[in-house]
Amino acid sequence: MNQIPYDNWIPGGVLRVYSRRRGVWHFGIAGATGASGPSVMHASKDRGQFVVTSYSEFAEGEQVEYTWLPESFERQQAVLTRAESQIGKAFKLLNADCEDYVNWIVTGVARSPQRERV
């Protein structure tokens, strides 16, 4: 099952899913839960920018897991504010991919360990 149960949905948490289509881990930030379910903020190569999508679009039918959770309400709000500030910014494989964005949003330092290994 690839669905993180709604009662375990933690806005501001870092999510990752293995993209079989691209052969890499894809990262995003758990967003708000609305009438149509939870949302995810992530850099989309297909759309060429940092976007908000449904959980199912982010997951693409694969297992999703948390890799980091905010340790306080203040940290959660800071992460959500930083993530929302990136919506519409460009996706660039060499310096602004999904992992760069998520690391910058959480730590203030944009980096992509996956890309660095290649």
Image (cartoon, helix red, strand yellow):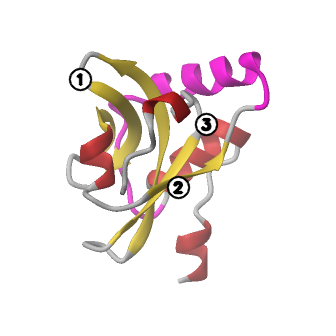
Q: For residue 99, which numbered disc appears in the image?
A: 2
Q: Residue at x 57, y 44 (%)?
A: 14
Q: Quadrant of the N terminus?
A: bottom left
- Residue 117 is drawn in which quadrant? bottom right
Coordinates of residue 53 in the picture (x, y in percent): 28, 35
Coordinates of residue 12 in the picture (x, y in percent): 58, 30
- Asked if residue 41 is positioned above or below residue 19 in the image, the reply reads above
Q: Residue furthest bottom?
A: 118
- Residue 102 is drawn in which quadrant? top right
Is residue 80 highlighted in magenta? yes
Nearest the camera: 95 or 65? 65
Is residue 117 highlighted in magenta? no
Coordinates of residue 67 in the picture (x, y in percent): 63, 53
Which residue type carries mark 3?
Ile
Which residue type carries mark 1?
Ser
Instruction: Look at mark 1 in the image and give the residue it sits on.
Output: 36
Residue segment shown in magenta: 71-94
Instruction: Look at mark 3 in the image and give the residue it sits on.
Output: 105
**Label 2 close to label 1 by CB (< 8 Å):** no
Find numbered disc 1 in the image and state the secondary structure of the residue it sits on: loop
Which residue type carries mark 2?
Glu
Q: Of tags 1 and 3, which is closer to the observer? A: 1
Q: Of tags 2 and 1, which is closer to the observer? A: 1
Q: For residue 71, which numbered disc appears in the image?
A: none
Dot 2, how many residues are within 10 Å of its Cα: few (below 14), some (14-19), or many (20+)? many
